[in-house]
Every structure is written in C-alpha cells, then in structure tokens.
Image (cartoon, rainbow, N blue to C red):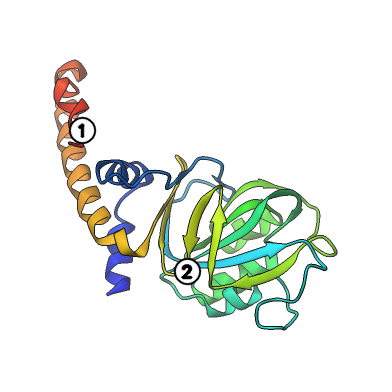
Amino acid sequence: MSDRLVDRLRRLDSGAVSDACDQLGLYGRVSTALHPMTGPVRLGGRVVTVLLGPPGEGESSDGTKRHLCAAAADAATPADVIVVAHQGRTDCAGWGGNLSRAARHRGAAGTVVHGAVRDVDEAIEVGYAVFATTATPRTARGRAEERAWGGTVSIDGIAVATGDYVIADSTGVVFVAAADIERVLAAGEAIVAKEAAMAAELDAGRPVSDVMGAGYETMLE
C-alpha cells in the first residue's frame, strides 16, 4: 500500500502538495531552506530519518559506533528518502560521496539533509539526488556523528518521523505526516487537475486575466 502512495506522491510537485496542506489546514510543513544540490530533480518518497549531533554526547541509540547515516543507507529501499537532521550545521558535511554511492546501489530515491553536504560532484556522477542547505568540503570527522536513526527528528523546525512522506523539487520541500498522506494526495490530485485545465486554456490563447480571475483565489476552498 505504501508503494502505491509513493507512486501517487511522485506524480505531484511541491506546490500542489503545499496547496493541499493549506486546503486541509496542515500548516508548517514546508521548508524553503533546502535546495537541490545535484541539479533539477523531483524527489518523493517515504522518509527514513537520521539524527546527527556533535561528537562526545553519548553513544548512538543502539550503543554502537558506525559511520554516520550508514545504517539508513543500508536499509533504504526504492520507495525511501533518507532525511538527515544535521541541525542546519554548515561547518561540516552530514552526507558524502560514498554514502551517495551506497544509497544509490540500494535504490534509495535520494537524500535530504538539513545542513551541509559534500562530494556533490560525486553524487551527480552516480546519479543520486541530494537536497541540502548548502555544500562544504569540510569532513564530519571529529565534528559530527550519528545519534540515532529511524525516529522522529526536527528538520528546519518541522517534526518529521520515519514513515512520513516528503516531496522535494527546485521550488522547495514539503513533509507530510503518514496519518495525513491519503487526504493530502487526494486534495493534491484535484488541485493538479484544476491547474492542468487552466494551463490548457492559457496554451489555447485565453487571456491569463480571464483564466486566473476571481475563481483562482477561491480554488482551495
């Protein structure tokens, strides 16, 4: 069932999903702090979270030490997007080239990092989509490590849990709670149908002032 939902989500874009959230009163789900680092792409799927933090603040949740994000990359499926809570840090990278290679090999849809990443050219080379706050060549070694994965994290002030959904493109990133995804998809699909009808009228030469008249402002009601 979840893969069917992912397929439907991937037919939408961030604008349609954001509009659907507005229509349903689901506010505070949009981040404009995250950008595509590997070129224009639309990325959608089920969330698998990773929480990073400064070193020396205790062991990871399962008591083991491992390379940050490695467990999530190993567990990822083609329906999944790895979402990394790097606390918005830009002083070191929360994702890198070998992780992109590993996640690409597992078939993961892509990675979203609230913070910096590195090895962007390598991610492009292997065809793996990465969204982040910015890029830096500075390593995480001695600067950041994994605290936990698979739980609930904060991304740009938005609570995001493993099993939630995310859509990301050049416009922005929208997170949808698992409990809301069915109604958000239904609303988003209806919005896309209305927008497509408007686009067809514009392509046919009808004035935009007519197509996007008073009815546009009430379209989400």
Q: Earlier in the sequence, mark 2 or mark 1?
A: 2
Which of the labelled discs sits on residue 162, or is there none?
2
Confirm whether residue 60 shows in the render: yes
Which of the labelled discs sits on residue 215, or is there none?
none
Q: Quadrant of the N terminus?
A: bottom left
Q: Position of residue 79 (x, y in %)?
A: 41, 70
Q: Quadrant of the C terminus?
A: top left
Q: Position of residue 127 (x, y in %)?
A: 55, 61
Left or right, 6 with reference to 157: left
Q: How many numbered marks have been drawn onto this rendered protein structure? A: 2
Confirm whether residue 205 shows in the render: no
Say above or below: 22 vs 65.
Answer: above
Write the residue at 49% across / 70% down: 108
Q: Which residue is mark 1?
A: 199
Q: Which amino acid, mark 1?
A: Ala
Left or right, 53 with reference to 195: right
